[in-house]
Image: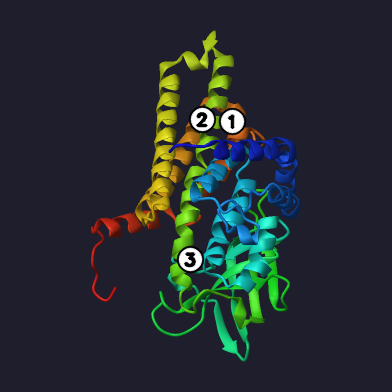
Amino acid sequence: MQFTQEHDEIRRTLRAIIDKDINPHVDQWEEDGIFPAHEVFKKLGDAGLLGINKPAEYGGMGLDYSYAMVMAEELGHINCGSVPMAIGVQTDMATPALARYGSDALRKEFLAPSIAGDYVACLGVSEVGAGSDVASIKTTARKVGGDWVINGGKMWTTNGTQADWMCLLAGTGEGPAHKNKSLICLPMKTKGVQIVKKLDKLGMRSSDTAQIFFDEVKVPVRNLIGQEGMGFVYQMQQFQEERLWGAISSVVGMGRLIDQTIEYTRERKVFGRPLLDNQVIHFKLAELSTEVELVRSLCYRACEEYLDGTDVTMLASMAKLKAGRMVRLVTDGCLQYWGGAGYLWDNPVARAYRDSRLASIGGGADEVMLQIISKLMGTLPRLENR
């Protein structure tokens, strides 16, 4: 990819906010188990960073996806995985369908304040019994007069305890599972929305992840995004951006961790010589660094094809699969070379080790990525009555 001065300016602007307003507070936020999303998002919104590729008439920059990818990549300079993930939900997971298919009124009500950083958004897709298998969701929205009446619940909802609105996927009719669902903008303060609890997770400690119930929740029919029954299709399109975001956002963090490990093993002496002098170590770090660059290149290629209007489902799935596996290899390999120091809870490699495990689960597990790739390759078995 060829980057312009505008791409570089986005990097500089975001990096300044990370260095001044985010990284100095990350350790405390991790200890608290939550970060101030409205405060952080407002700083990003004021800088124009929450709507880089969103329409200018709603406060966005109106730039192409390559600029959003540059932002996602630069988020890797944040010293945890939680805050980047929360930002990614706002920019690349909960708002793309609204920006693309929402009515003018709906975009003014929900998209514009999300771009400005006045609203925090969350995505309501996964449920207790339906994570990667999106078609199996049980939450329903039935029409009663001029309202949708919503019942059910969502699980693993990033930003869930602080969000102002949810991009909700719900069943809105009968028929095939891929054609009976819709996306609806749901204000989180609506009567009947119950935040059951903030989940206690292995990693991503400062990301508030919630379990949410809906009991006869009423929202206007006009809160429907796009066409009724097209929600599954819209969500699959959102997944392309989510999976590319997940892949490219891991690259800088992996590179930083390798650099930190090089520095540590150069200073750490064992049997009178630096750990780094051991061929098994510097060769392994060289191999990991090479693999990280391959992930970056795959993401860049997918981005270029996406800009050309190509369906990049296969490339996005491959990038997500490879990045999820690579970040596990990098964090595990680097932790090994830190020895006992790497096993300490507050060590940066230990945090990365905990945070990174989600990469092969969230947004579609590795096995789902393999299934998608196999299907597109034409190698998936054709089962009767499937």
Q: Position of residue 219 (x, y in %)?
A: 65, 80
Q: How is the image coloured?
A: rainbow
Name the residue: 55% across, 53% down: 53
Secondary element at image label 1: helix
Q: Name the residue under label 2.
A: 334
Q: From the viewer's perspective, is residue 308 above or below residue 26? A: below
Secondary element at image label 3: helix
Secondary element at image label 2: helix
Q: Circles 2 and 3: CB distance less than 8 Å? A: no
The amino acid beneath tag 3 is: Gln
Disc number at residue 64? none
Which residue is nearer to you in this view: 65 or 128? 65
Q: Mark 1 points at which residue?
A: 342
Q: Which residue lies furthest to the top in this view?
A: 272
Q: Name the residue under label 3.
A: 235
Q: Can residue 165 be seen in this view?
A: yes
Name the residue: 70% across, 78% down: 192
Q: Position of residue 41 (x, y in %)?
A: 70, 52
Q: Position of residue 148 (x, y in %)?
A: 60, 83
* The C terminus lies in quadrant: bottom left
- Lower sequence index among marks 2 and 3: 3
* The N terminus lies in quadrant: top left
The amino acid beneath tag 1 is: Gly
Question: Which tag is nearer the camera, tag 2 or tag 1?
Answer: 2
The amino acid beneath tag 2 is: Cys
Question: Which tag is nearer the camera, tag 2 or tag 3?
Answer: 3
Q: Where is residue 244 in the image (x, y as percent from the top left)?
A: 46, 50
Q: How far apart are marks 3 and 1 (CA)?
A: 39 Å
